[in-house]
């Protein structure tokens, strides 16, 4: 079997997605996700101009060799653009392998260790009462693990305050330029422990709660937050530090027993290594679509296993349902799965990219269809052309740039 064509499909059914369709001489094809929010066209061009010509004529069965060929063969390797392009190709090749073998990808990864993947959703509100209400609604939907974010007094708009809706849909800035948010650590650090005190006192201890810091604190601030949240027993505190601050996770670790999840901005196994082997984290939450696909992530999971680190793969709305399916295929196969972030995709996304995981009673399921079980409807994709869009940016009150 040989690869005869590589199609790069850029589509915007509500938000932009970059999809890769790899076609073989035997008519079997595979589909992968290569979406990098805010820099979509950089990946699409990389795939179309640099990577597609390298794939034509190759045997699609050789996933590992193709991965090594694209990763090491570029000489300048790694980074979000190249690793996302690589992930798109990798997922499509696993999809092909599954279809050729007549097996779902989870079966090729060793078979099921569980039936479904425990999922978590996003809850939020303008004040504590609204967040509580949103958490209660999620509990009624069947969620057992819930992320809680709240608006911060004095800051007009803050990451995560849109809850489930924000997770599923894009935020368009005026004239397609980034929206500007204001960030101050003081009010944030004063608000978040009080939020969880409120939620625990109203909802009890059973529901698992977590919070996403979104890499916006410095090391000592993150350590303070982890310590002040300790009494409320979070499932985890997500991405407390920027990826550049890996060694400072020691400070956070020493300050508290609040479990730490890191890694949605890590783009490779090598970035994950020190935090796993030094046991500075409890959950590794890389993004399959930005860290080299299934081939990249299964090695990360395997290295995490003996260190007692569980997985919590990133599952945002800006990763296509193909990535969400790949997440769940891995989740149900690996022994050290922890939890899976998920979103409910709007109808038009499901029209363009059918077959993503389904949600039932707190968990996510994939079908037993050969491959990943997802597809791309190219005709539907053409109805939704690319629209330039950026993620928001954050500035301090004095106007200086901060991490969003
Ligand atoms: O594109 C950026 C989003 O994927 C990210 O902001 C979502 O932090 C996120 C999360 O935890 O889902
Ligand atoms: Mg996050």
Image: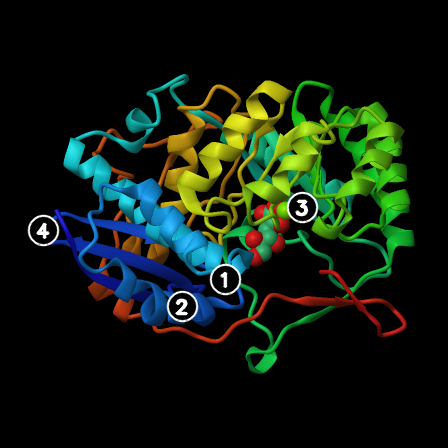
Residue at 50% over, 40% down: 342
Q: Residues within 10 Å of mark 2 (few under 14, many from 20)?
A: some
Is any part of residue 192 visible from this angle? yes
Residue tagged 4: 27
Image position, residue 293 (x, y; %) = 42, 45
Alpha carbons under labels 4 and 1: distance apart: 29 Å
Circles 3, 4 touching at the beta carbon (< 8 Å):
no
Relative horizontal placement of residue 2, taking residue 153 as reference (left or right): left
Residue tagged 2: 46
The tag earlier along the polypeptide, 3 or 4, is 4
Q: Residues within 10 Å of mark 4 (few under 14, many from 20)?
A: few
Which quarter of the image is occupied by the C terminus?
Answer: bottom right
Circles 2, 1 touching at the beta carbon (< 8 Å):
yes
The tag earlier along the polypeptide, 3 or 2, is 2
Q: Could you say which quadrant of the image residue 387 lies in?
A: bottom left
Image position, residue 35 (x, y; %) = 44, 59
Residue tagged 1: 81
Residue at 36% over, 19% down: 112
Image position, residue 160 (x, y; %) = 66, 51
């Amino acid at each position: 079997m040989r690869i005869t064509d590589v199609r790069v499909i850029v589509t915007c059914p509500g938000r932009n997605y970059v999809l890769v369709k790899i076609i073989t001489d035997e008519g079997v094809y595979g589909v992968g996700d290569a979406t990098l929010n805010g820099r979509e066209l950089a990946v699409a061009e990389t795939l179309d101009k640099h990577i597609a010509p390298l794939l034509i004529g190759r045997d699609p069965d050789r996933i590992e060799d193709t991965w090594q060929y694209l990763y090491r063969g570029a000489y300048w390797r790694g980074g979000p653009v190249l690793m996302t392009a690589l992930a798109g190709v990798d997922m499509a090749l696993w999809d092909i392998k599954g279809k050729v073998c007549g097996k779902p990808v989870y079966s090729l990864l060793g078979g099921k260790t569980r039936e479904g993947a425990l999922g978590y959703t996003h809850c939020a509100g303008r004040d504590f009462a609204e967040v509580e209400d949103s958490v209660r609604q999620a509990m009624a939907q069947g969620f057992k693990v819930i992320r809680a974010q709240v608006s911060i007094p004095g800051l007009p708009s803050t990451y995560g305050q849109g809850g489930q809706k924000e997770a599923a849909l894009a935020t368009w800035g005026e004239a397609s330029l980034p929206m500007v948010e204001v960030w101050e650590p003081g009010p944030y650090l004063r608000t978040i422990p009080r939020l969880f005190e409120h939620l625990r006192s109203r909802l009890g201890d059973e529901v698992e709660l977590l919070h996403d810091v979104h890499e916006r604190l410095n090391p000592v601030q993150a350590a303070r937050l982890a310590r002040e949240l300790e009494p409320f027993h979070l499932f985890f505190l997500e991405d407390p530090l920027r990826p550049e601050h890996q060694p400072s996770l020691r400070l956070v670790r020493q300050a508290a027993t609040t479990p730490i999840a890191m890694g949605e901005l890590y783009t490779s196994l090598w970035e994950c290594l020190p935090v796993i082997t030094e046991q500075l984290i409890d959950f590794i939450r890389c993004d399959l679509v930005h860290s080299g696909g299934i081939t990249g992530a299964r090695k990360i999971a395997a290295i995490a296993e003996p260190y007692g680190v569980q997985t919590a793969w990133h599952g945002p709305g800006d990763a296509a349902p193909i990535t969400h399916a790949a997440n769940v295929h891995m989740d149900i196969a690996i022994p050290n799965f922890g939890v899976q972030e998920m979103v409910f995709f709007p109808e038009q996304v499901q029209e363009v990219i059918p077959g993503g995981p389904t949600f039932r009673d707190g968990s996510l399921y994939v079908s037993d269809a050969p491959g990943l079980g997802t597809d791309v409807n190219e005709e539907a994709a053409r109805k939704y052309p690319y629209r330039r869009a950026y993620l928001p940016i954050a500035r301090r009150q004095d106007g200086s740039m901060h991490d969003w």
